[in-house]
Image: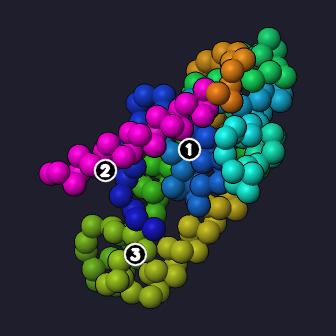
Amino acid sequence: MNFNHPVYINFYKFLLIEEIVLADNPATVHYGRCNLIGYLASPDCIQSLTIPNVDREYQLPDGEISLKIHVEFHPREFLHSTVQIYGEVRLIEKNREMTVENFESSHSLIHRLRELQRSLELEEGKDREPSGTNDKSMSLAVRIRLEKEIHTFEDKYMPVIYVDSIRRLPLAREIMLENLNYRLIREKVDSVLRMRR
């Protein structure tokens, strides 16, 4: 795992609920603002929707993936409808009360890993910038200790969206599909531009 600090995304980047919930590790989850489209099943939970025009073998049924949300207002007018949520991805320890004071971020977890690597390597007489577990020059003892810490994050933290606003979205599936198509086009354009540099 790379220990570079993630860059905060300051705009509401479109993400699928699955991208947040199924991230490899809480330390690698999106850092910053996002917008999500789904079904508001309860005041504290948004569920995934099936994406139209995707091969059946890759489709998940409606509601297969759920993501906790933290809302400062009661979203009763949006309950049991398809919605678009604007907010910020946060992390919370699974057994803690969901309050703003208890929220963490992927940035704070990466910072902890960097500090742990620095401390462990200083004990071995190495004073260098933290790099992550991909570093071939890292000692086995340090790598094992860091990987153990990374695995604890998986058991300890879950993602939550700190909601700024919610809006009803009757054409949710169609808008999701258009957002995904736009993302593919954007990635292709970016790839071509990188090759020309």
Viewer-proximal residue, 66 or 119? 66
Provide the residue designation for mark 2: 191
Provide the residue designation for mark 3: 134
Image quarter for residue 130?
A: bottom left
Q: Is residue 56 magenta-colored?
A: no
At a point 84% along the width and 22% down the height, the residue shown is 80
Q: Is residue 197 visible?
A: yes
As helix, strand or loop, the secondary structure at mark 2 comes to: helix
- Dots 1 and 3: beta carbons under 8 Å? no
As helix, strand or loop, the secondary structure at mark 3 comes to: loop
At a point 75% along the width and 24% down the height, the residue shown is 82
Q: Residues within 10 Å of mark 2 (few under 14, many from 20)?
A: few
Provide the residue designation for mark 1: 104
Q: Is residue 76 left or right of residue 37?
A: right
Viewer-proximal residue, 94 or 50? 50
Residue at mark 3 to residue at mark 2: CA–CA distance: 25 Å
Q: In the image, which residues are magenta?
A: 175-197
